[in-house]
Structure formats: structure tokens, C-alpha cells
Image (cartoon, helix red, strand yellow):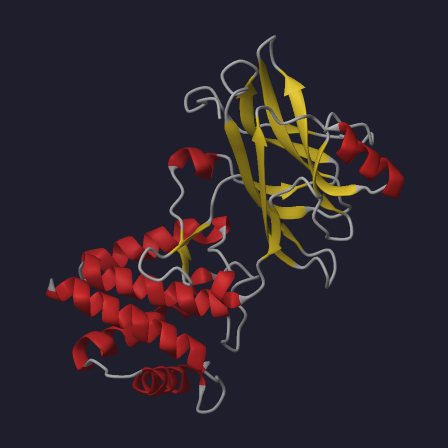
Amino acid sequence: MTNTNFAFEPKRIDNLNWSGISELPELIQNDLQTKQKTPLFYLHNESIDNYEDDIYFVNNSDETLSFVAPYELMKRDVDCPEVVVAAEPNERDKSLTYTDVLPKQGVRIDRQHIIYDSDYINQIIVYPMSRASKEMWGVWRLNVCEKGLFSSSYPLLWEEGTKPSHVVSADKLNDPKDRPILPCVLPIRQQLYQQWVEYYDHASASLMRSITDMIYRYDFGIVGCYYNDTWDEYSSEAEQIANMLIKEGTDSADEVLAMMTEVYDVSFGAGYTRVPMDVAERIYDLWLRHKNTVNK
């Protein structure tokens, strides 16, 4: 929406309470009032002058959210659309990553201009993470689009975890193949990548990072890493696997599985870690792409 690259900074507002009064279209409002639903998350507008509103994501739940990220965390691979890869956020995005968002607290995520934005299709994508219950547990991707401006008191997700009818999508990303790389691990991810680049080369470092991403997202080791924010928990194993692939090569996912099992058996003891075949297949695909890139 409005270009806020130079004037937009993180900001929080406490003690925001859902009024139940919304500026959504009348048909949607009637639906809200009939069912008397309460949103878990919603958008709230704060006027900053006669022309612009700041848009806040409001945590209307009773839990403190570990993070809220108002930007895209994942994208589909160009060559293989069923594969999710990390979206690399820019510096502005990183600055708008909020941690420990309190109950009834709003965090500023965007800005809209009543003239410049009123004639366009506008989109907001925001990722919160919930640990409130078994049903809510996970990373959510909330996607809303409007022709024109976003109204205030704009529900994003109902308290039982269902999607309001006006929301494009509200997806809980608990399937490992769909999990994004979480914002809190991006610094260590970048740090290790730079170390690998300096010691090896960009191609090898990219393979090591991609393998670590896969292990992190599938979270199959004896120590959990995804929900514990430890991307680097198995980075040394990923580095070893990448080096074995580069030095020895492989012709199948079965051979990758054998390599990975060997590495994990040495690190943690024979039989303690079961490597999923799905992970071996995906790492085999990563290896083939690496080989094609290097051989170009």
C-alpha cells in the first residue's frame, strides 16, 4: 500500500478491546451480529491525519504471541510449485517483526492513504504463531485483500480458529512441507550461511543452508528444533550430509537416506534417529539442483 519505507517504524498500542462494531459491509456485519462471534485476531485503524490511517494487527486472544510477522515468510519454488522455500525478507520487513505480542495489544503493520489506496486492490499478509491449544497450535498465514481501504475492526480469525467469510485464506501451517522459516531464526541462519560461504563457496553454502532448512522444518531429530527456535540444532549434520553428497555423489533418494542415517547414527547413536524417506527425497532433489547449478 502506501510507500512507508522511510517513515514507518514499529509501534505498539496496549489495551485495545474488540467493540463488536465494524465498518465491514452490512451483509457481513449482520452475519457477525447474528452469530455473535469474537475474533482471535483483527485489524484496527488509527488515524494519523486527514488522509492516512495506520493499520494495526490486534492480538485479541488471552495468550502472548511469540511473534507477528506482517510480510511473506514463504514462497513456492519456481521449478517445483509443490515445494515451499524460504522468502528472504528485506530490512524493512525484519524491522517490523514483533515478538511477545501481549493480549489486547496492537502492533503497527501497514499504512493506507484514503486517496492513493482507494482505487486499488490492497493486500495484507501476516503470520502470527499460536500455542493456545491443540486446535490453535501452529504458525498461521492470514491473507486478506480489499478493493480500496481496509476498515477498522476487521476480523482476521475467529476465536475457534475458523476463517471469516471476507478473509481470502487463514491457513495453519503445521504440515512440515508447508512450514515457513520463522523470523526469530533468520539471524543465525544468515550467520551460518556466511560462515559456510567463507569456508566453502556460495554453491556449497546454499546446499548446506537448504538441507538445514529441510531438517528444521521436518523437525525429526531427537531434539525438537522448529518450535524451540533452534534452526542450527542439526546444522553440523546438514554440513556433513552436504559434503558427502558433493564428494561422493548419489543416484537415488535411498542412497541419501543411507547417508543421512549414517551421519545421525554417528552423532546420536545407532537407531536413535529415524530419518523420514520424505526428507531424503527432498534432499535428493536439492542435490540434483545443486549439481545442475554447478555444472552450468
Quadrant containing the C terminus is: bottom left
Residue 93 picture location, percent across and down: 45, 37
Residue 24 picture location, percent across and down: 72, 29
Residue occupying the far top of the picture: 50
Left/right of residue 213 with respect to residue 8 in the rendered view: left
At horizontal 73% and vertical 28% (from top left) the residue drawn is 25
At horizontal 44% and vertical 91% (from top left) the residue drawn is 270
Residue 256 lies in what quarter of the image?
bottom left
Q: Is residue 148 above or below residue 270?
A: above
Q: Is residue 59 above or below residue 287?
A: above
Q: Is residue 1 above or below residue 69?
A: above
Residue 35 lies in what quarter of the image?
top right
Does residue 129 appear anywhere in the picture?
yes
Q: Nearer the viewer, residue 146 or 265?
A: 146
Residue occupying the far bottom of the picture: 270
Residue 13 picture location, percent across and down: 68, 28
Residue occupying the far left of the picture: 296
At horizontal 29% and vertical 84% (from top left) the residue drawn is 252
Left/right of residue 52 with respect to residue 294 in the rendered view: right
Left/right of residue 128 with respect to residue 73 in the rendered view: right
Left/right of residue 57 with respect to residue 38 in the rendered view: left
How many numbered marks have been drawn onto this rendered protein structure? 0
Does residue 69 appear anywhere in the picture?
no
At horizontal 33% and vertical 82% (from top left) the residue drawn is 253
Residue 182 picture location, percent across and down: 50, 53
